[in-house]
Image (tube, helix red, strand yellow):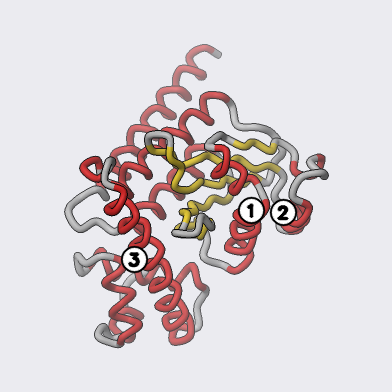
Amino acid sequence: MHDIEHAADSTREERINDAFVRVAGTLVEDYDVVDLLSTLVHTCTQLLDVQSGGILLADGAGTLELVASTSEEAETVEIMIVAAGAGPCIDSFKTGSVVSVPDIDRDSNRWPRFRRTALEQGFRAAHATPLRLHGAVIGAMNLLSTEPGALSARDAELAQALADVATVGILHERSFRQPEVVAAQLHLALDTRILVEQAKGVLAQVRSCTMTEAFTALRDYARVHDITLRAAAEGVVNRSISVEAMVSQPG
């Protein structure tokens, strides 16, 4: 039994190391913030064995906006937005603390709309982790599970570590004490997401595909052509990139 547990721990450590290498690999010159956050939230859900996740950043008015998600489909986007308005995400953002909901079904007093929407979509537990920087909170990561139960202390620490990596990636170490640069970076991330949404709509219509497939095609094109996700989305929206060329990309 001990050997089995040791092997499982070794495998887990290897997956964690691979995760940080994968995320760090996106932190190159001209990296794309939305692509980084998308990689991070997918990695986090895989490592922690939860079924859905999203990263939300605060705009200038302090409203949380969804920037990256494990699925681009309307149902997943909806639950993340609901959680941002009145749910674990907004509470985590406002308090700067982890907000854990081990059993959404029994948590009937807080956030009735979030509870109803989550249960309708088959989710039974939620875990929100703040994105913090020197006491300031810039957003939150929301993880959803189809099984009730809290994250273990070990998994909660890993979620926070990955959220911290996301924060560093968004803001750059050199801009930590420059509020105007931080504001510009956050604005860029949110603005990029708007472009990505528009480009997804164009691709989904042309390809008759799902929003998740459209996002994958967009990201694949950006990586194959060594451009940012933002540049690829902008090209689709203003038609400087042929939609047919992007449709032919492997997805």
Q: CA distance from mark 1 to mark 3?
A: 26 Å
Q: Position of residue 165 (x, y in %)?
A: 35, 39
Judge by depth and name the residue closer to the eye, 27 or 170: 170
Q: Position of residue 74 (x, y in %)?
A: 60, 69
- In the structure shown, which secondary structural element does the residue marked by tag 1 occupy? helix
Residue at 52 percent across and 12 percent down: it is 2
Q: Earlier in the sequence, mark 1 or mark 3?
A: 1
Whether label 2 touches label 3, CB < 8 Å: no
In this figure, which residue is indicated by the disc labeled 1? 83
Q: CA distance from mark 2 to mark 3?
A: 30 Å
Judge by depth and name the residue closer to the eye, 57 or 50: 57
Q: Residues within 10 Å of mark 3 (few under 14, many from 20)?
A: many
Judge by depth and name the residue closer to the eye, 15 or 166: 166
Q: Amino acid at mark 2?
A: Phe
Whether label 1 touches label 3, CB < 8 Å: no
Whether label 1 touches label 2, CB < 8 Å: yes
Nearer the viewer's eye, disc 1 or disc 3?
Answer: 1
Q: Which mark is residue 114?
A: 2
Q: Is residue 231 left or right of residue 162?
A: left
Q: Amino acid at mark 1?
A: Ala
Q: Position of residue 176 (x, y in %)?
A: 28, 41
Q: Amino acid at mark 3?
A: Arg
In this figure, which residue is indicated by the disc labeled 3? 219
Residue at 55 percent across and 14 percent down: it is 1
Q: Earlier in the sequence, mark 2 or mark 3?
A: 2
Q: Quadrant of residue 161?
A: top left
Q: Residues within 10 Å of mark 1 (few under 14, many from 20)?
A: many
